[in-house]
Amino acid sequence: MGRNKSIKILLLIFIVIIFYLLGYLRNYIFLFLNADAASIWYNEAPLIPPHLLGFTTGMSYEAIERLKWILTFTFYLLFFSVTLITIYLLFRNKVYLRLCAFLYGVLLFISFLFVCTGYAIHNFAMHAYNISRSLMHIGQSPFIPLLLFIIIYYHHQVIPPKRS
């Protein structure tokens, strides 16, 4: 096995660890925020936040919801950035980088359309929110990077790569 191949395997292992840790951190934060929001909504005893989330003590339900939206976009951008960097490091092909940006952009745009639809059609608001949230969850998971990796790997097997 060549040195280049060993480096790529180590890089892949490192990338998998980064995606896992990023997903774990996101899940950790959102599980607490959801539980905290529920305790406020149902007038239950407030939760004691972990040290990482100590700043949420005493936040109102509305403030927690705003924080969740901010964190949603932050994690979306983090997953997008890590995916983009991964594709660059592994394949160094502009077409693949554009494909990544296109997929994340389309997902964000469709999610935004559902949010707008929810505001415009009040009877559809809860459904639009749930659909939008589900689409954003896809962008905050390893699903898109795995999909892109499979597409790019298949493309490499069918068409020899050209550096661009």
Image (spheres, helix red, strand yellow):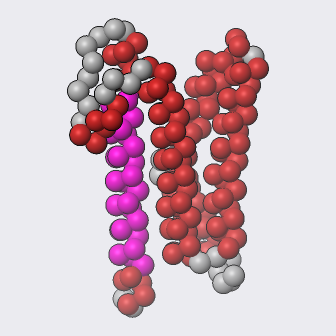
Left or right of 77 on screen, residue 96: right
User: In what quadrant of the picture does the C terminus appear?
Assistant: bottom right
Query: Of residues 113 and 146, which is closer to you in this image?
Result: 113
- Dominant SS in magenta: helix
Is residue 160 in view from this perspective? no
- The range drawn in magenta is 8-34
- Percent of width and height locating residue 16: 38, 61
**Furthest-top residue in this view:** 43
The residue located at (34%, 8%) in the rendering is 43
> Which quadrant holds residue 12?
bottom left
Q: Nearer the viewer, residue 16 or 80?
A: 80
Can residue 37 be seen by looking at this rendering? yes
For residue 117, above or below residue 82: above
Relative to residue 143, is residue 155 drawn left or right?
Answer: right
Magenta-colored stretch includes residue 13? yes
Residue 28, quarter of the rendered image? top left
**Residue furthest out toward the right:** 120
Q: Is residue 139 magenta?
A: no
In the rendered image, the vertical position of residue 4 relative to residue 142, given as above or below: below
- Residue depicted at x 38% and y 24%: 59
Measured along the vertical axis of the image, is residue 7 above or below residue 53? Answer: below
Q: Residue 37: where, in percent of width, then height?
A: 39, 21
* In the image, residue 115 above or below residue 74: above
